[in-house]
Image (cartoon, grey):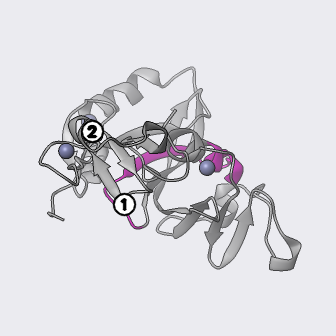
């Protein structure tokens, strides 16, 4: 595999930055500052966490998010399912400082529910983990970058920046893969799918998510 610099887009000015420089850009982005200024006044002040999420073993998939720090864990779980994970309503859990917060807690394993507010279990600088589907698991690493107060009427999660889709090359030629076979065993371009006569029911589309190719994940 060739090493490359993961890049992504600022949601405010649409400029492209490397994964390593996007956080500092977000602090100084003029568009973002202008938007904050323009909003002000009639809105209420809400505390937010600036959160970075990435694939634990696929760090080329990443998101910078702003989430009200009083949100319960299930709200974040729900968002992650929507943008990156959901295929067949599998179980999921966060691991924070050795504690497990599960969507369906097992008392035997000392698991807790996802009702806790983020600000009650997390502080800036903390790293924590999320698992979706305990069979074919997609694992995510999350980190609280900072806590900030901002004027807003919206308690919804805001995407500050997101990775550009990594380019995945076909396992048989030099073209870009559009489909995946066998949970990432083989990546295929449109031509090679025809050429090698793959069963289309066994293929999953290449999508911009760390769950690409897994279980029945299509990104829909
Ligand atoms: Zn920007
Ligand atoms: Zn599934
Ligand atoms: Zn090919």
Quadrant of ligand 1 in image:
top left
Quarter occupied by residue 58: bottom left
Q: Give the magenta range.
A: 57-78
Measuring 25% from the left and 54% from the top, which residue is drawn there?
A: 19
Which is nearer the eye, 100 or 187? 187
**Rendering coords of residue 208 (x, y %):** 37, 42
Q: Element type at marker 2?
A: strand
Which is nearer the eye, 73 or 136? 136
Mark 2 surroundings: few (<14), some (14-19) or many (≥20) residues within 10 A: some
Q: Quadrant of the N terminus?
A: bottom left
Mark 1 surroundings: few (<14), some (14-19) or many (≥20) residues within 10 A: few
Quarter occupied by residue 176: top left
**Rendering coords of residue 113 (x, y %):** 80, 61
Which is nearer the eye, 61 or 9? 61
Direction from residue 194 to residue 103 in the image, left or right: right
- The residue pinned by badge 1 equals 185
Q: Report if residue 76 lies within the magenta region.
A: yes
**Rendering coords of residue 143 (x, y %):** 47, 63
Residue 91 seen from this side: yes
Residue 9 is tagged as 2
Marked residue nearer the N-terminal end (2 or 1): 2
**Rendering coords of residue 93 (x, y %):** 67, 62
């Amino acid at each position: 595999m060739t090493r490359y610099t993961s890049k992504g887009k600022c949601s405010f000015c649409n400029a492209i930055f490397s994964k390593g420089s996007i956080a500092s850009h977000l602090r100084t982005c003029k568009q973002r500052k202008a938007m904050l200024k323009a909003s002000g006044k009639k809105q209420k002040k809400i505390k937010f966490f600036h959160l970075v999420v990435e694939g634990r073993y696929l760090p080329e998939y990443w998101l910078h998010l702003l989430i009200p720090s009083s949100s319960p864990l299930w709200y974040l779980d729900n968002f992650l399912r929507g943008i990156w994970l959901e295929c067949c309503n599998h179980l999921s859990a966060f691991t924070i400082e050795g504690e497990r917060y599960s969507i369906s807690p097992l008392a035997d394993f000392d698991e807790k529910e996802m009702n806790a507010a983020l600000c009650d279990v997390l502080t800036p600088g903390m790293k924590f983990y999320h698992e979706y589907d305990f069979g074919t698991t997609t694992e995510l690493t999350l980190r609280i970058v900072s806590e900030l107060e901002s004027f807003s009427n919206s308690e919804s999660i805001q995407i500050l920046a997101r990775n550009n889709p990594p380019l995945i090359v076909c396992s048989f030629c030099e073209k870009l893969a559009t489909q995946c076979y066998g949970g990432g065993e083989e990546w295929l371009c449109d031509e090679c799918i025809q050429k090698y006569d793959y069963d289309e029911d066994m293929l999953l589309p290449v999508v911009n998510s760390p769950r690409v190719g897994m279980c029945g994940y299509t990104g829909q």
